[in-house]
Amino acid sequence: MRTTPLGVYVHWPFCKAKCPYCDFNSHVRNGIEQTRWRAALLAELEHAAREAPGRRVETMFFGGGTPSLMEPATVAALIARTRQLWDTAPDLEITLEANPTSVEAGRFAELADAGVNRVSLGLQALDAAALRFLGREHSVDEALAALQTARQHFARYSFDLIYARPGQTPEAWAAELDRALELAGEHLSLYQLTIERGTKFFTEHARGTFALPPEDDAAAMYEHTQARLAQTGRPAYEISNHARPGAACRHNLIYWRYQDYVGVGPGAHGRFAVGTAKQATRRASGPEAWLEAVERAGHGTAETASVEGRDLVEEALMMGLRLADGIDRTSFAAVTGADPVEALGEAKLAPLVAAGFLEISPGHLRATSAGQQRLNALLQRLIA
């Protein structure tokens, strides 16, 4: 049996409404045949177990879309079948993303009974006008009520906020962040608003309907966020994620450490070791196309590829530099067959180290705070 952990990701593609900033694989449908979807997800889960057999599952993550719209019976069935198909860790982390509407929050007791032991709430803002701008369907009061309900049913909970919104000042964000910290548990996810191609916001921003805060203000918000969270004992362990020691989301760490995971559901990706390469899988994105494929063939795989050599190094690099601790050079070499510093070379690394964007130690290669703020540009320099 492999000693590396395996994560299982389950994608539920449906939402009540499409948020204007979201470029995830999420869809709005008037009606969903829950029993049919349960059978299809279970079928593809069994296919995933054949793709990556003999592993030990350490994490399971229900993402979306809005997986809290799944029937708890479906969640329970997928958890139970995962335990049957693979060996599972005694402290298996099972996370489910949820929206804080009253209807979904009312399901928390059933989801906890199903086996979910960590919930991540999409609050996104603690301001009514900001929630309207972001297209959220819940109110601030509903968000606070859902958070209270989550505390009652889950020992581990987190919530998301989006900052650097149009018109937001560093002072306003500091006040909102302080309020968030009064509500927070062991983990917080804090994202700067980005404009993604294909979203409603992309079109509106291009038309000049709204403008993001100046770069200096956005940088000040980021720096305040890092300092304030560290001050409260929840330092960043990844660019946008903060946690008390030992409370990081273990499933997401699998991604950032470039470990193995399988993906189940529309648009889900997988990466798992096969020999000295990684097998990359992608399921069909469209919910209906995926469902029909699973019912016909037992899985909805749209693409399978082998990731090796330079591609393997670059993928691991893009994920690992997101971590505050950076890339563990020994672990990186075990996965890719190459030391990251040697693979990149002195000519690329030396100028970025001298400019204060990268740090190299015998054990690690990491992006500094300045480097993480410019990570996309930094990665372009490194993998060009």
Image (cartoon, rainbow, N blue to C red):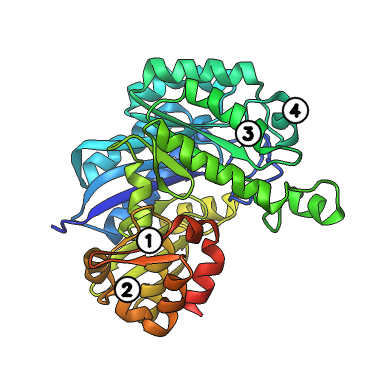
Q: Are marks 4 and 1 in contact (CB under 8 Å)?
A: no
Disc on the earlier residue, 3 or 4:
4
x then y, percent, for residue 363: 23, 64
Disc on the earlier residue, 4 or 2:
4
Marks 2 and 3, how far apart in space? 37 Å
Q: 268 or 341: which is nearer to us?
A: 341
* Tag count: 4
- Where is the N terminus found, in terms of image quarters? bottom left
Left or right: where 69 falls relative to 108: right
x then y, percent, for residue 241: 44, 43
Residue where numbered disc 3 is placed: 173
Q: Which residue occupies 69% across, 59% down?
A: 197
Work out which residue is located at the far left of the displayed protein and give it.
1
Instruction: State which quadrant residue 42 falls in.
Output: top left
x then y, percent, for residue 81: 29, 40
Disc on the earlier residue, 1 or 2:
1
Kind of residue indicated by mark 2: Pro
Residue where numbered disc 4 is placed: 129
Kind of residue indicated by mark 3: Trp
